[in-house]
Image (cartoon, rainbow, N blue to C red):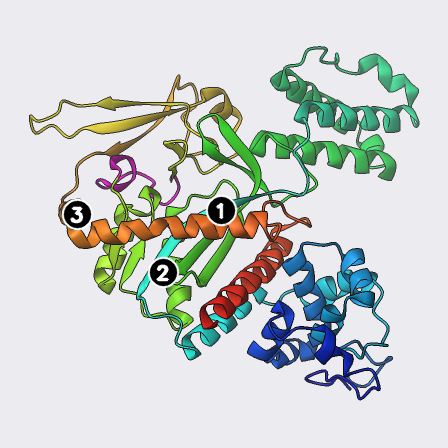
Amino acid sequence: MLSQQQQIQFSAFSGLYDLIVPKDNLLRKINDLIDFTFIYEELVNKYCMTNGRTAESPVRMFKYLLLKTIYTVSDVDVVERSQYDMSFKYFLELSPEDGVIDPSSLTKFRKLRLKDNDLLNLLIGKTVAIAIEKGIIRSKSIIVDATHSLSRSNPYSALEVLRERSKLLRKAVYAIDEDMKAGMPEKNTTDELEKELAYCSALEKYIEADQPLCHIPAVKEKLNLLKETVADTQEHYTLSKDRDAKTGHKSTDSSFFGYKTHLAMTEERIITAAVVTSGEKGDGPELPRLLEISQQNGIDVDMIIGDAAYSGKENLELTGELGVKVVAKLNPSITQGFRKDQDKFDYNKDAGMFVCPAGHLAIRKARTGRKNIGENQLDTYYFDIEKCKRCPLRENCYKPGAKTKTYSVSIKSGTHLQQIAFQQTAEYKEKIKHRYKIEAKNSELKNVHGYDRAIAYGIQNMQMQGALAIFTVNLKRIIKLIG
C-alpha cells in the first residue's frame, strides 16, 4: 500500500535536521506551508494496490521533481545531491541514513504517473487557494502576458532532411531493383527548397507507379517517411524532433521555435492561470480562457491589465458583458471594426503584423481610404504569395492565380469609443503602471527556473514543465509575502 503522507521514520540521527537545516530554509518553509497529500489523492488511481513490489511514494517522487525545478538541475544531479544535502533529505522526508531512488525512476514517474493529469491547473489552483487562505491576495486585477520557451530541438534545414530521406528511399529501391535507376527523375542540384520539393514529389510518383515495388515493406517505409516530410515542410517550413513546437515571431525580423505560455497574475504577483500553446499562437485569443481559469481558482476579477494584444474587439465585448475593465492600449490593427476571418488570423503585437492560420507572418502592410472625410480606412496586410501557393490550408483562403494575398481590418469602431475615453482616466493611467510586474515574473521563470527552453519534447511535457515552474514561483512568492 501507498502511504498518503510520507513521514520521517524514527532514527537515531533524525535530530540532525534540527541542527543542520535552519528554520528559515526555503525547503523547510515549503514543507511547513503545504500539505502534499493532494498529490497522492490525484495520482492514487495510477498505482496498482495488489500487485508488484511496494512503489515509491508519489508524494516523494513529486518532491524530487519540485527540487529539480527549484534548483534547475538534472534527474541525475537532484538524486545525487539528495544523498548528501540534508535540506533535500528533510524535504523528501527521508531519515538521514536512508538511500535514494535511481534517477531513471523520475523519468518513469513523469511518463507513467503524471501523464494525462491536468497538473498545470491543479498546481496553480492549489497555490492560489493557499494565497487566498493566507489573506495574501487583496487586489481584483489580473495582469496578462505571454512568454516564449524554445524547443528542446532546433528546427533542421528542410532541404537537408528532404535530401537525406529521398536518398534513403532510392537506396531501398536499388537494393531490390537496380534497373529503376534509368527512369529516376533528375535530382535537384540547387539550394532552392521549391525545386527539392518538386523533385521529391516526382520521385514519389515514379516509385508509386510500380505497385509491387512500393508495397515491399523496406520501400514502403521509406516512401511514407518521405511523403510525411514533404507534407510537414509544405505546412510548417521547419522540421524537428519536437512535432508540437512551431515558429513564433518576437518582431518582424526575429523569430523563435518552440512554445508560448500565456499567463495571468495578480498585482501581488501570484500566477492565477496559465495556458500553454505552440509558438505561433496569438496572445489575445487566450484572454477568455485565462480569465475563466482565474475565476475558477477563486479570484474575483474586475480588471485585466495587459498590452495591445489583448484589446481586440472580441475581448472588449466579452469583458464588457462581464463588467470587467480592460487596461490595455488600443491598437487599430487589432481592435477596430468587424474583420473577415477574425477567428483565424491573429495579430502579433511584437512584429506589428497579422499571422495567418498556417502560422505565416505578413510581410508588409499599407493603409487605404482617406482620413477625416467619412470614408472607412483599412489597414491591409500582405502575405508571401509563394508560401500561399503551396500552403495546405490554401483552399477558401488563396485564390489560384492571384498575384497577392491580403488581409484587411477596419480602423473605425463605435465599440472602442468607450475604451478610448477610459484610456484618458486617472484609474487607467494608475493601473497600467502594474504591467511591468508580469515581465519580471516571466524573467524569473526563465532565468531562475530554466523556463527559457523545453526540457522534453511535446506540448504535454511543456505543460508539465510549466506546472512545476509556476508552482515553484508561486510558493516562493507566498513564503516571501507571509514573511
Residue closer to the observer: 164 or 61: 61
> In the rendered image, which residue does mark 3 sit on?
415
Q: Is residue 289 magenta?
A: no
Residue at image location 22% in from the left, 63% down from the top: 323
Image coordinates of residue 159 in percent, x first then y, are 68, 22
Q: Eyeballing the image, is 348 above or below 177?
A: below
- The kind of residue on which mark 1 rests is Thr
> In the rendered image, which residue does mark 2 sit on?
267
Q: Eyeballing the image, is 156 above or below 19?
A: above
Label 2's element? loop
Query: Dot 3, crowdedness within 10 Å: few (<14), some or many (≥20)?
Result: some
Residue closer to the observer: 172 or 386: 386
Quadrant housing residue 47: bottom right
Give the CA separation, mark 2 to mark 3: 28 Å
Residue closer to the observer: 372 or 217: 372
Earlier-in-chain disc, 3 versus 1 = 1
Q: Nearer the viewer, mark 2 or mark 3?
A: 2
- The kind of residue on which mark 3 rests is Thr
CB atoms of marks 3 and 1 within 8 Å? no
The part of the chain drawn in magenta is 331-345
> In the rendered image, which residue does mark 1 sit on?
147
Give the CA separation, mark 3 to mark 1: 29 Å
- Quick check: 360 left or right of 57? left
Query: Dot 1, crowdedness within 10 Å: few (<14), some or many (≥20)?
Result: many
